[in-house]
Image (spheres, rainbow, N blue to C red):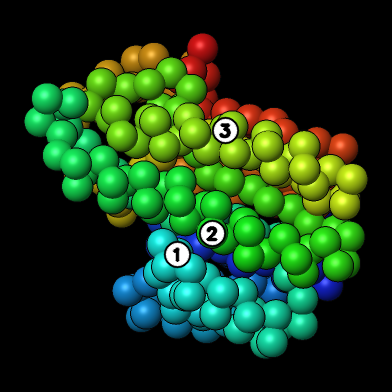
Amino acid sequence: MFDLSEKVALVTGGSRGIGRSISQHLARCGAAVAINYHKSADQARSLKAQIESEGGRAIAVQGDVRSPEDVERMVGETVAALGRLDILVNNAGFNRDTLILRMSLQDWDEVMDLNLRAVFLCTKAVLRPMMKQRWGRIINIGSVSGLAGNAGQANYAAAKSGLIGFTRAVAREMGSRNITSNLVAPGLVITELTKDIRPEIVQGVRQRLLIDRMGKPEDIAACVVFLASEEASYITGQVISVDGGLGL
């Protein structure tokens, strides 16, 4: 297990789905975790209690990551409560899937705001404390859709593809400060947010996998923990697909 003791992580959308598993794994490796949530207060509090019951440290920080004011407050609360900020996991995101001809401007803007604009806001807010301590990890959660596109996901694919360029730009700007920036691109991971996907779509994905099972949140969390660790200190600007071979 990687040693993240004395590190502090902020996980956006950290109370549900993949974010919840990431928060748990970081805490089990010794990191103190700030669990960001927007509306899922009960889930954030229950996760905080679970982490503490296992001997870890956690706080729940409410905030809309699309709001500059909320983001600055969240980062300030994290540093005030936990003493520093070493790891940012930009996990919050959602989709509004439909074909381009049916896609509204609102569908486009909302997906861009949460999946791309919010990552810019959160990353910008954490860089100052990371630069002062000359150590940091920026880990963005992308998607295989951002690598290959996907019918019905023009907005989501565009946002996640843009996230790749953003990740690499941050890596170039921050490498000299010992701050790495990487992206994890999950395939189809079954969570409470994806459990309602039509069975024929899930079956179509399974037929393309090289590993005969669907992805689990724990698969993504394990990669995030590695990228957050000292062992990954020479990895930056990279896109790591965790997709069972779906993208090949």
Residue 124 as seen in the image, left or right of residue 230? left
Mark 3: few/some/many CA within 10 Å (<14, 14-19, 20+): many
- Residue at image point 45% right, 51% down: 117
**Residue type (three-letter) at the residue carrying disc 2:** Leu
Instruction: List the residue tagged with mark 2.
Output: 121
Image coords of residue 107 (percent x, y): 21, 44
Image coords of residue 37 (percent x, y): 43, 71
For mark 2, give the secondary structure: helix
For mark 1, give the secondary structure: loop
Q: Is residue 15 visible?
A: no
Q: CA distance from mark 2 to mark 1?
A: 7 Å
CB under 8 Å between discs 2 and 1: yes
CB under 8 Å between discs 1 and 3: no
Instruction: List the residue tagged with mark 1.
Output: 65
In this view, the residue farthest toward the left is 102
Sequence-wise, which precedes: disc 1 or disc 3? 1
Of the two numbered discs 2 and 1 in the rendering, the one whose residue sits closer to the viewer? 2
**The label number, if any, that marks residue 164 in the structure image:** 3
- Residue at image point 70% right, 74% down: 32
